Amino acid sequence: MAFVEIKNLIFSYPKADENALDGVNLSVEEGEVCLVIGKSGSGKSTLLRLLKKEIAPFGEVSGEISIRSENIGFVNQNVESNIVTDTVQSELAFAPQNLGTGRKETALKIAEAASYFNLGSVFNEKTESLSGGTKQIVSLASVFTAETDLLILDEPVSQLDPVAAEDFINIVSKLNREQGVTVIISSHRMDGILKAADKVAVMDQGKVIFCGTPSQAARFLVETEHDMRAALPPYTQVLNGNPIDFSDAKKALNHITYRKECVQVKNDTSLTAKGICFAYKKGLPDVFLSLDYQAEKGKINAIVGANGSGKTTLLKCLCGVLKCYSGKIKASGRTAYMPQNVHTLFVCDTVREEVNDAKLLTQFGLDRLVQRNPFDLSGGEAQRLALAKIMSVDCDIMLLDEPTKSVDAPFRIEFAGMLKALTEKGKTIIVVTHDLEFAGRYADNTAFLFNGKIIANSPAREFFSSLSTYTTSISRLTGGKAVSVDDIEVEQ
């Protein structure tokens, strides 16, 4: 029998018209890495949560789940909710202490985890002071101290910058290789994760419709023209499903031609920050010290940077949620702000009460979920609801913090079309994002926040083509000659 065996699993949420899971069958062998992919609402998060009974969702369930271990660790997509204590040291101690482990053995486990995950430099830090990437690694390390046999990861890199995401996946792969930990991971970002997997399960409408090797899954998505083919690494997409590895894709460069770059017309500025300075408390270091920023009217203006660089803080300053102690911010029109934690926007008991606009609900794929509680939605569905709520506000400038996190690739394309349509009406979009592929393909301008200042702010293609590492995979592949799949053609 497989290490994890799921047979004809059916699950429905209260008041739901359709099953969230509708006869799922899946087996995972001991020591395997299984990647679960699918559109938002396909049942990924529900399936993963049902594998750990302590956090299983409430609803009607039937079928069979068999796991040959009770040592199950779970790290979810919400970085903040993974942390339960106020310091890194106490976070690492939490699991062994609750298991009744002795003081000396606990101390040894903590030391081992801190060393294995390279957390020595932040060992005595408050968890609230850590970047999102470090918090996620601390969460993984705390699971490690509980001697986990099965590690379940639900969109663990959705809020991480590309470097932090790569570090996280490398550590997970190391745990799998060196400790024999079985891993089940869901992700909308497949670049880097795909080649680390042993098998890929594709979910659609509550079912597993395909399960095979990463290469087989890539070919299946391309050959069937499935919507999730848009989630494949960009170089895999343009090369028709093969190869899945970046180094192999480099060998196919001789088959690529490049489209000409369009000349971008510069628009008026709709939001300006001049010399702004901000600190969270008197006596603490400044987050920004004389920062300048401009956003063009009628364009998508992206802001990128590493976890902890201050992107969210900047967005809050620009919309007035936080007050700078010096400098000036001028906005031409009304602003609307969507926070990174979208659940803070929800105040009603149902989706319909949150957004009472049938057209918007249909546009965002929420029409089937109108009776659901917003807090019962998957991460991607919650993100869609928040976006619909912001779209319903009459504003001139939209400030969006990580709007594509937890959102599936097909909807990301639809969402980009919605933003483009808004810019054509003169709306200004400012997007803070770790999704470099999204920014490279759809943003008009991109700014880089580093060390409390905007280091660069230029047309997106010019911006990404000038960088060699912190850039899109297509730009790295082509040496900056192209930055997205729209910039290249493959010779047949």
Image (tube, helix red, strand yellow):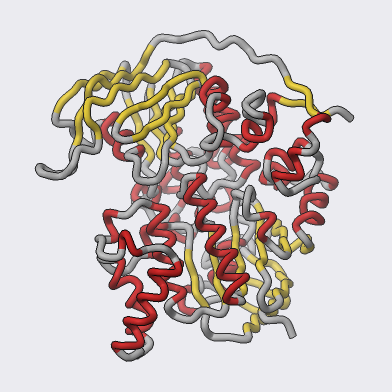
Question: As rendered, which of 370 and 117 lies closer to the eye?
Answer: 117
Where is residue 465? Give x, y as percent.
57, 25
At 30% across and 18% down in the image, what residue appears?
A: 272
**Residue 257 x, y percent position in the rendering:** 78, 23
Q: Is residue 421 above or below residue 388?
A: above
Tell me the quarter of the picture where residue 185 sits: bottom right
Could you say which quadrant of the image residue 303 lies in?
Answer: top left
Find the residue positioned furthest to the left: 282
Can residue 60 be seen here?
no
Residue 163 or 159: which is nearer the viewer?
163
At x 18%, y 41%, the residue is 285
Direction from residue 210 to residue 119 in the image, left or right: left
Give the residue furthest to the right: 492
Decide: is 290 above or below 129. above
| Residue found at x 32% / y 81% | 107
- Residue 128 position in % (x across, y down): 27, 57
Q: Quadrant of the N terminus?
A: bottom right
Q: Nearer the viewer, residue 118 or 33?
A: 118
Q: Is residue 47 left or right of residue 108?
A: right
Place of residue 80 in the rendered image (x, y in percent of width and height, measured from the top left)? 36, 58
Task: Tell me which residue sits at (39%, 52%) in the image.
Answer: 132
Q: Quadrant of the C terminus?
A: top right
Total labels drawn = 0
Residue 323 appears in the figure: yes
Question: Residue 35: which quarter of the image?
Answer: bottom right
Could you tell whether 41 is left or right of 271 in the image? Answer: right
